[in-house]
């Protein structure tokens, strides 16, 4: 069975370096004619993954851990969004779409503290009050 490069990376936790020595079949991509699809033999992928990780159980464990981490990050974003919306609502501002789409709010929801501070050039703190002050001022500027 042949598997696409992207699926191979996802299922077998391989990277480009792992795949470069494997036999590949190149086919036309019906979705994007300028970028052909690379297809790999499933048995070759499995052998490569076992060589890299030791056994199938280890591969499955790592994949599960990655999915768990991804889910945890998503849940953390939802919690930050809820906290931010509640903070605004407690102060009388209830238009959720304005809150979520405002740039500092978006960054607060989507990014970790270090990435948030880097994106904001350390001009505001990574806390609800600071984000609220900047976002609320920006929203009021648009309204007025």
Image: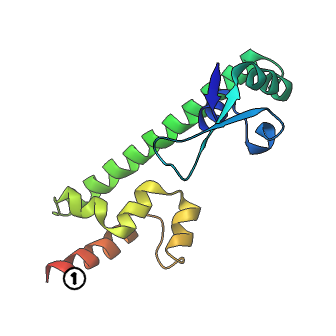
Residue 15 drawn at (x, y percent): 73, 41
Question: Residue at the spot x=13%, y=84% of the render?
Answer: 144
Mark 1 surroundings within 10 Å by alpha-carbon count, few (fewer than 14), some (14 through 19), many (20 or more): few
Question: Residue at the spot x=42%, y=47% of the render?
Answer: 77
Q: How is the image coloured?
A: rainbow
Q: Quadrant of residue 109?
A: bottom left
Total of numbered circles in the picture? 1
Query: In this rendering, is residue 60 above or below 74?
Result: above
Q: Quadrant of residue 134?
A: bottom left
Question: Residue at the spot x=36%, y=69% of the render?
Answer: 103
Question: Residue at the spot x=31%, y=48% of the render?
Answer: 82
Q: Nearer the viewer, residue 88 or 71?
A: 71
- Residue under label 1, please give it: 141
Q: Which quadrant would the N terminus be assigned to in this image?
A: top right
- Mark 1, secondary structure of its residue: helix
Q: Nearer the viewer, residue 3 or 88?
A: 3
Residue 91 drawn at (x, y percent): 20, 63
Query: In this rendering, is residue 80 above or below 119?
Result: above
């Amino acid at each position: 069975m042949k598997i696409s490069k992207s699926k191979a990376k996802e299922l077998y936790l391989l990277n480009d370096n792992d795949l470069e020595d494997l036999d590949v079949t190149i086919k036309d991509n019906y979705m994007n004619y300028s970028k052909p699809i690379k297809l790999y033999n499933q048995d070759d992928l499995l052998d490569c993954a076992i060589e890299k990780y030791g056994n199938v159980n280890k591969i499955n464990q790592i994949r599960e851990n990655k999915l768990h981490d991804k889910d945890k990050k998503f849940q953390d974003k939802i919690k930050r969004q809820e906290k931010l919306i509640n903070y605004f609502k407690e102060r009388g501002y209830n238009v959720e779409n304005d809150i979520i789409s405002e740039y500092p709010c978006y960054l607060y929801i989507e990014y970790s503290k270090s990435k948030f501070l880097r994106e904001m050039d350390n001009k505001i703190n990574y806390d609800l009050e600071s984000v609220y002050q900047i976002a609320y001022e920006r929203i009021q500027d648009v309204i007025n």
